[in-house]
Amino acid sequence: MAKLFVLAEHRQGQLRDITFEMLTKGREIAEKTGTELTAVILGSNVKEHAKALAEYAQAVILVEDPRLENFNSEAYKKVLQALIAAHKPLLIMMGHTSYGVELAPRLAAALSIPLATDLIDLAFEADQLTATRQMYGGKVNVKTVVRKAETYIATIRTATFTPQKPSPPANGQILETPSPLTEDIAEKRFLQYVLPPPGGVDITAAEKLVGVGRGIKDQANMPLMEELAKTLGAVLACSRPIVDKGWLPTDRQVGSSGKTVKPKLYLALGISGAFQHVLGMKSSDLIIAVNKDPKAPIFSFADYAVVEDLFKIVLPLKNKVNEAKAQKT
Amino acid sequence: MDIIVCVKHVPDTAEAELKIDASGKAVDKAGLVYDINEWDDYALEEAVRIKEKQGGTVTAITIGSEDSDSTLRKCLARGADKAIRLTDPKFAGSDSYATAKILHSVIKTMHYDLILAGLQAGDDGATAVGPILAEMLGIPHATMVKKLELATGTAKVNRELEGGLEEQIEVKLPALLAVSTGINEPRYVSIMGIRKAMQKEIKIMTLADTGLTEAEVGEQGSWTRIEKLYVPPAEKQAEPVTGTPDEIAAKIVDLLRSRGLI
Ligand SMILES: Cc1cc2nc3c(=O)[nH]c(=O)nc-3n(C[C@@H](O)[C@H](O)[C@H](O)COP(=O)(O)OP(=O)(O)OC[C@H]3O[C@@H](n4cnc5c(N)ncnc54)[C@H](O)[C@@H]3O)c2cc1C
Ligand SMILES: Cc1cc2nc3c(=O)[nH]c(=O)nc-3n(C[C@H](O)[C@H](O)[C@H](O)COP(=O)(O)OP(=O)(O)OC[C@H]3O[C@@H](n4cnc5c(N)ncnc54)[C@H](O)[C@@H]3O)c2cc1C
């Protein structure tokens, strides 16, 4: 039976969630295409991971090699080239993550295998891969057709599919496969992990957050935002561009490359609602978004939508909060 | 050090109202304001900083229509020495793969020690051009580059992983590095810089100059083909809070009070 590969992603001894998200979507595609859902795990001392994967997949290909201890796209590329040559899978799914983004395009180019990236949906229609992704910061979705081929590579957006363990567990067979690597990768070497600098403020512990985005326009407006946050008894957080510009330190960033927060209130000011930001705040209890663009994607995640110029709202809001607090005491 | 920077001229859509055009396969570009892709802005700045420290040249290269000249001019004003624009109606419909092929056809004839690209194009970016181009050139690459230190023959690179974690890796030069936002603070362009840049030449090349065939570029030469665009269905619909600013503020306060948040 032809195979459908899901490349397991792991780091520092942990399988990452995207792996199980892909295995869940992969199961659906495998059933429809009559392929065998096969998890592929490359690493060093990862037999325990292989067992966990076997609960989800019909087969697990396990390649162990000390050279695979930490992710290295060149090492992964070489091993996958050998596995693809041996198994000719219909599809190889990887995460659209820091690892998948590094590996997938290069592997695709090396083997001339068509690639579709950052997918929020995928299916085979008449033997051909159709792939859906987002454009323009999530304002538009695009359905693409991928050129006909024997094998396809797709990178899958994180947190798009909800992992579900098959019941009963798939109990896939673990196929230990010798590593094809014969020497160290000289042109690209892993050196070390670098932890984020210890932060002064823990936004994940805050009960209320005011999140500011590029819509606040100027660093000169930051004090106003701080004041509003203070009045609300909230902590100031932000989208990535605010950190990139150096207006707030890294520890205030909400999103996939920042923190995941779950406050009782998330007040988003001038944030468009890009996927990477939303990932970090969509589980907040109450989300109020202020954005002058009625089509801003943030409004499909918020509970309350204020379509207005944020600068018209901030001062009145601050005043009304102060009034309310005064009434209370 | 000779550095090539791949830049793309893209529409700024964060605040724009997007309409899907009659073909259903693209957005209506009329009225959109174009500028250098955000990620490429950082890549160019990084290149210029390296040149200022170590000497060498910076060449900006783009595939795009004549309008892309404004992006190339910006690069020249920022400190790029040369600019190349690849323009041909046959390039339309190129995906990341075809785009990388076109860039490769020209870059392979040039001298370089380092190629910088953006991690992704902010418009319809697939996050793929950089690594594909590196594979075609047979040089190592790294994406999501947040920090870059050059030594003789190698580059030490911090790649961003998820949740604020980074990994430090070492790649041999020449290499292609696709940078993340925040790797530096791009400078503002001085009026004098822009004036001086107006005099610099932009080299224009077409399909005929690339040595590629028509079938290798555009939709024919691509892995993916757009079938249709559509507006994403809302995950949930937020309840509108309307009125004058004061009324809106009062409603928000009521909301917060009812939940014990004030
Ligand atoms: C008429 C038309 C039809 C199209 N049809 C399709 C289609 O069918 N399928 C599809 O996937 N895309 C299509 N596109 C979009 C396509 O042209 C993309 O721009 C192309 O895929 C380039 O890759 P990217 O934007 O994904 O770049 P990414 O891989 O996201 O960009 C990474 C980096 O690569 C470099 N780069 C990217 N593009 C350029 C460039 N043009 N010049 C120089 N450097 C660049 C930059 O450094 C950038 O930061 C179409 C565009 C047009 C105008
Ligand atoms: C690998 C990777 C990781 C990333 N990680 C993160 C992450 O962890 N966190 C994150 O936030 N982003 C992250 N991003 C970036 C993300 O894709 C978006 O670019 C970013 O979230 C956009 O920030 P923004 O909403 O502040 O800015 P924009 O998208 O520019 O939006 C600004 C918004 O402000 C509105 N606005 C403007 N003026 C006003 C006004 N006067 N009143 C009201 N509204 C106004 C506009 O309508 C617009 O919607 C990541 C990207 C990549 C590629």
Image: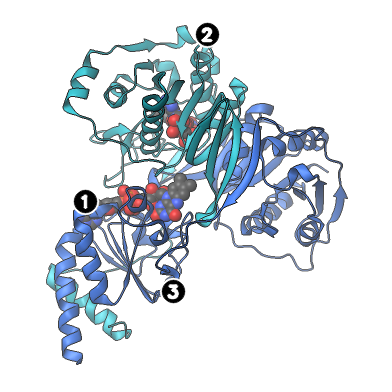
Q: Give the distance between the C-alpha atoms of the residues marked 1 and 2, in whole angstroms.
A: 47 Å
Within-10-Å neighbours for mark 3: few <14, some 14–19, many 20+: few
Please, what is the three-letter code of the amino acid marked with disc 2?
Answer: Gly
Assign the N terminus of chain A to one quadrant of the image: top right
Please, what is the three-letter code of the amino acid marked with disc 1?
Answer: Asp
State yes or no: Cβ of the residue under disc 3 lies below 8 Å from any atom of ligand 2.
no
* Pointer 3 residue: A205
Query: Residue A58's image quarter?
Result: bottom right
Q: Position of residue B114 (x, y in %)?
A: 50, 24
Chain shown blue: that is: A
The residue at the point 39 percent across, 39 percent down is B122
Chain shown cyan: that is: B
Q: Of marks 3 and 1, which one's residue comes earlier in the chain?
A: 3
* Pointer 2 residue: B211
Query: On what subunit does the disc labeled 3 rest?
Result: A
Assign the C terminus of chain A to one quadrant of the image: bottom left
Q: Are marks 3 and 1 on the same chain?
A: yes
Say which element carries label 3: helix
Numbered mark located on residue A218 in the image: 1
Left or right of A185 in this view: B108: left
The residue at the point 69 percent across, 41 percent down is A91
Q: Position of residue A52 (x, y in %)?
A: 77, 62
Q: Nearer the viewer, mark 1 or mark 2?
A: 1
